[in-house]
Amino acid sequence: MTILIAVLALLALAVVFGALLGFASEKFRVEGDPIVDQIDALLPQTQCGQCGHPGCRPYAEAIAEGEDHNRCPPGGEQTIQDLSDLLGREVLPLDGEADSADVKKVAFIREAECIGCTKCIQACPVDAIVGAARQMHTVIADECTGCDLCVEPCPVDCIDMIEVPPTLTTWGWSRPDGVGKTPERLINVVNLR
Amino acid sequence: MSLLSRLLPRRRFDFHGGIHPPERKALSNGTPIRPGPMPAQLILPLTMHIGAPARPLVQVGDRVLKGEKIAEASGPVSVPVHAPSSGVISAIEPRPIQHPSGLDAPCIVLDTDGEDRWTALHPHPDFRAIPRPELLALIREAGIAGLGGAGFPTAIKLNLRDNQRIEQLILNAVECEPYITADDRLMRERAPALIRGIEILRYLVQPAETIVAIEDNKPEAIAAMRAAAEGTGIRIMTVPTKYPSGGEKQLIRLVTGKEVRSGGIPAEIGVVCQNIGTAYAVERAVVHGEPLIRRITTLTGEAFTQPGNVETLIGTPVQALLEAGGVTQPHRGRLIMGGPMMGFSIDHPMSPVVKTSNCIIAAPLTELPEPAPEQSCIRCGACADVCPAELLPQQLYWYSKAGEFDRARHYNLLDCIECGACSYVCPSNIPLVQYYRYAKAELRKQAAEHQKADRARERFEARTARIEKEKAEKEARRQARLAANRVKQAPDAAAPPAQADLKKAVNDASAAYKTAVKAAKEAEASGADNAVALRAEAERLKAHADALKANLRDAKAAGPAAPAHDDGLPALKKAVADASAAYKAAVKAMKDVEAGGDGDIDALRADTERLKAEADRLKAALRDAKAAAPAVVAAPVQEDPVAALKKAVADASSAYKAAVKAAKEAEASGDGDLDALRAEAERLKPTGSKPNCVTPRRRPRPHHHQPHRQPPRLRPPAMTRSKNATSA
């Protein structure tokens, strides 16, 4: 009799909590995969496709499914580090050559040579090129992510990737050289009259 | 409150840490303020303040007068720029400015004409007569930004919300950094004007108490200010000499004991803090109508043969000041803008003095030697002892050095005021502040990149969505075009087939009639019994043919617009029912003929064949119509045609049986038609399920059709639909 009561009581509890869990899983269901969003937030969003995926989000989905997280040259070491922290994976060296990832570049159209073919406009993943057929095109430098996807399609090779010079708002102090070095800049005023 | 605070000795507060570097103020504080040089060229950067750059109002070649506005504020956090002297605008272009980066920034270059002619000024000696908002606008228009060092637009700091109540207005005259004596000399020489300026600020802020905080190493300035403040209620407070007591948060702590929260502003705790130099600028702007075009700058350092304070025009190149201070001997040393603790080295002697430049130090290497090389941190903790912001400089150093900026931020890196106390005490000569500045810059860069990435993501997603939409629209347009083509074909296809169908029916009917007449004539000629019956049949067929003709006329009149798709199935159903009814009549006629042993069975058979073909078509139409009919419509309708078909099948089998029976009878009677009858029976047998439907054309009895003009007209639409369905 005691055993019966115990079994019934546990059964009742199981039913109640089962129902509760079932209800909660319906009520508080999470749409989509939150880890993909988190990975996507860490990627640089250049949409350059250098990882072999058509954009940053597809790569985020691939990483979530187990692909290596070291295939993002624009993100560089920092992104690999951040992804490793997020995913609890090992820090991997950047896949492929790290081609001066630190230097920010933007596309620049030599406008005199542009023939207005709109091929670069179609290639730009972030709509950062304005222009129309048979009209001169130009790049909105502020929106350009520097993915260089527009360089290849140009039939007259009039697109250059140019470095973005630092401005007063983007300039920042550099890291001191470290132990054994004199840090401050010396200003030579010898030639002052 | 005020009585109590006056009677009781004021409680002394203190802030954590701080250092006592050599002051070296005696170098420059012994001589009165002298007017600065009048350089041949003034260089006016468009960003001398924190916020958006000013927008130039002049063009190259314009002649301007002293005090004329040459650039306007370009946003809420921005201030205008005025011409410090009269002359001609010679360029608007990037020039080297005083900035640690050594980068160029857009500047307006003014070639002075030496006349120094003023524009018309609008003084307001009685500032209390001006409403506060207008007074604030006046201060803003005068281009006043904090003269202490940060250069935050003063009008914004003074513009309080209606519900904000300010307890303390603190005038920062601490001047805690070594070497600098600009505020000291200003207070000694122009105390009455300063008090007027403070009164204006008081009027704007309406504080419960006003405190001028002066470090106790400036006794002359304290005495002068005390004398000038007599009877105004402005409290002159001395604070102990300690660096960095002039930091805004440190001074508030020192004076009131209150602490500004991390990331907060003093107004949140009821305090407004202004530099004493700013008060002077406000006095000049309101009482004299003079915009901010000059300031007191300390020229100091052992390289100057005549150190001291000069009232220099803003935009004066450092080179001109060096000459004015007597730095003529070539020497090797450091040129620093700002104090030795927080200032920075400048590269270019043509950099101009701006609104925030309070000091220029030209020091030979003997005075400010080259710093010793950095050594490893020995974890002595001296930096933590002196940090006025109560941070952990060592931790910040490790994290900044290792590039773990997020952790550095977690240790409140952003609360660092970059005072340099930690670097000053570091026995290993670690340039700690530069590490913090580096980490802060990286954090800023990361934030900017993150923002840019978000925008890029947004744009990418918008583009993807747009492309999807375009694709969908294209597809929709394609479908619409397809549908339009179909509709265009449909009237052509629908009406003619309908009419063709009708025409065929009419032809069939008239052929049947002719055959029937022929059969009747033959029967009459042979004197058969069933001649009457055949004649009657012929009459019926004629009536049917007439009815069909009438329908055809109607259909032609109705034209292509007629189609009424909805009725397709019922019409078909009706046709099927008609067919079965007609079929029965045909069977009966055949029986009659059989009974008479007459020879016109051939004619009947030919008729039946035609009817069979007709029935096949009809059946196909029914099937297609069923397939094409929308499910909703199909459900109720489907049953009926099926039932009708079943019935037709039953009829067909009975017809077959009848035919077989007739054949047997013919056999028995030895009739010559035997073969024909058998063939007929055979035909009826395999096609059993079809012929049933075949008959409809045939049996159409006048009474059946006349009341229902529609069926024939309605059927074609059904067929039309079936065509549509197949073509689609």
Image (cartoon, rainbow, N blue to C red):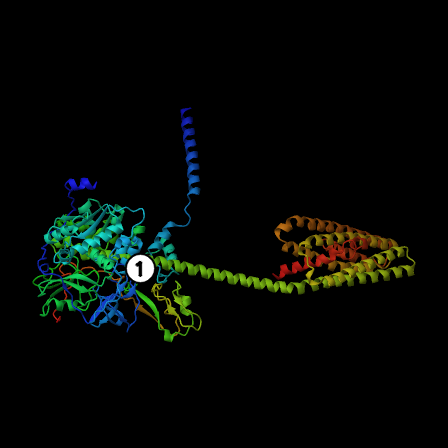
Where residue B28 appears, as percent x and y from the top left, is 10, 60
The reply to whether residue A60 is in sight is yes
In the image, residue A11 above or below residue A52: above
Is residue A91 visible from the viewing direction of this image?
A: no
Where does label 1 land, which residue?
Answer: A75
Residue furthest left as drawn: B366
| Label 1 crowd bin: few (<14), some (14–19), many (20+), radius 10 Å | many
Q: Position of residue B489 (x, y in %)?
A: 64, 65
* Image quadrant where one finds the C terminus of chain B: bottom right
Task: Please indicate whether residue B531 sits to the left or right of residue B126 in the image.
Answer: right
Amino acid at pointer 1: Gly
Residue plotted at (43% across, 29% down): A8
At a point 9% along the width and 55% down the height, the residue shown is B22
Of all residues, the one furthest to the bottom in this rendering is: A112
Callout 1: residue from which chain? A
- What is the quadrant of residue B123 in the picture? bottom left
Taking the spot 50% from the left edge, 60% from the top edge, the residue there is B472
Viewed as shown, does residue A4 lie left or right of A88? right
Q: Position of residue B302 (x, y in %)?
A: 8, 63
